[in-house]
Amino acid sequence: SALYNNLAVLCPPARPPAFGTVHGTSLSLLGNEGPPRQLQARGGGSALSTPLLTQAAWCELPSRVLLVLTSQRGVQMYESDGSTMVFWHALHVPEHPAAHSVFARGIAAAGGRFVCVGTSSGAVLVFDIPPKGTNVTLSEILEQHRDPITDIAAEQGQAPDGAGDLVTADDSGTLCLWSTGEEFTLLGKIPGSGCTCSSVRLWNGIVAAGYGNGQIRLWEAGSGQIRAQVSAHARWIYALDLAPLTGKLLSGAEDSFVHVWQLRRDPDTDGIEVS
């Protein structure tokens, strides 16, 4: 399906990588030392009402790895190989649906023991994950966005003092910077400019955001200041990914190109360079 951020990758130590991609009502899984197989969305009473999946991602926490799926009905969490469902959270679907559809989208592990999932209302659900077992709890709901969440990212490097370690993005292009902990704290909000922020990454205090107009913008996660803007693609950016050890940023877009960028912090000026 032509959904953005529609490739999940898990690289476990000393084992082959696993890949997952969403199409319609199912998630196709490849790798994990087994034959290719599919996971179905849940939450419908019959085959005719099976909800469409919107995203899948492996969430790697210190104590365990969970495979998280989002759909039009809710959030499903599985053990990393997809064999056992750990948790199911249903979204509130109004009796008389408005013009806007209901769905969950945007998935990230954060703060060592939390999984954050975005929703079409702009709320971000924070789930507290136990080291083992199924006693997952909804610990907090972050309500700062007014538009559907598109993507969520957690810090992948070493955040400078005072910088947020979680960023959430929405359909209007608004970004919210958070500090995780027992309670999540909003550190700053970067207003949107009317263009969807489809994909976001966070590395060494740098927010890398890809937009529907093909631009990549780099922001400071501490101050919210813009540090660079690149006209990276001719069409909508569909995915960003970041190599945490090297600072290489990969962007893929509707223009059929994949670009690899090098991000650097200048130690003398603390400026951000992109090439």
Image (spheres, helix red, strand yellow):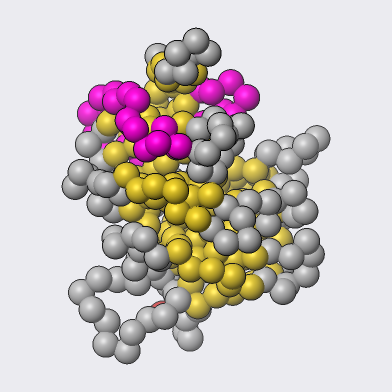
Q: Is residue 21 left or right of residue 100?
A: right
Task: Answer above or below: position of 252 versus 196.
Answer: above
Q: In this view, does 155 lie to the left or right of 131?
A: left
Query: Where's residue 171, x and y in %?
Result: 29, 53
Query: Where's residue 54, x and y in %?
Result: 42, 59
- Which residue: 27% across, 31% down? 215
Query: Is residue 165 something that shows in the picture?
Result: yes
Does the magenta portion include 88?
no
182 and 241: which is toward the camera: 182
Query: Is residue 109 something that shows in the picture?
Result: no
Query: Where's residue 50, x and y in %?
Result: 45, 75
Q: In this view, does 98 lie to the left or right of 85?
A: left
Magenta stretch, residue numbers: 220-248
Task: Answer above or below: position of 143 versus 36.
Answer: below
69 and 160: which is toward the camera: 160
Does the magenta portion include 244?
yes
Q: Farthest bottom residue?
A: 95
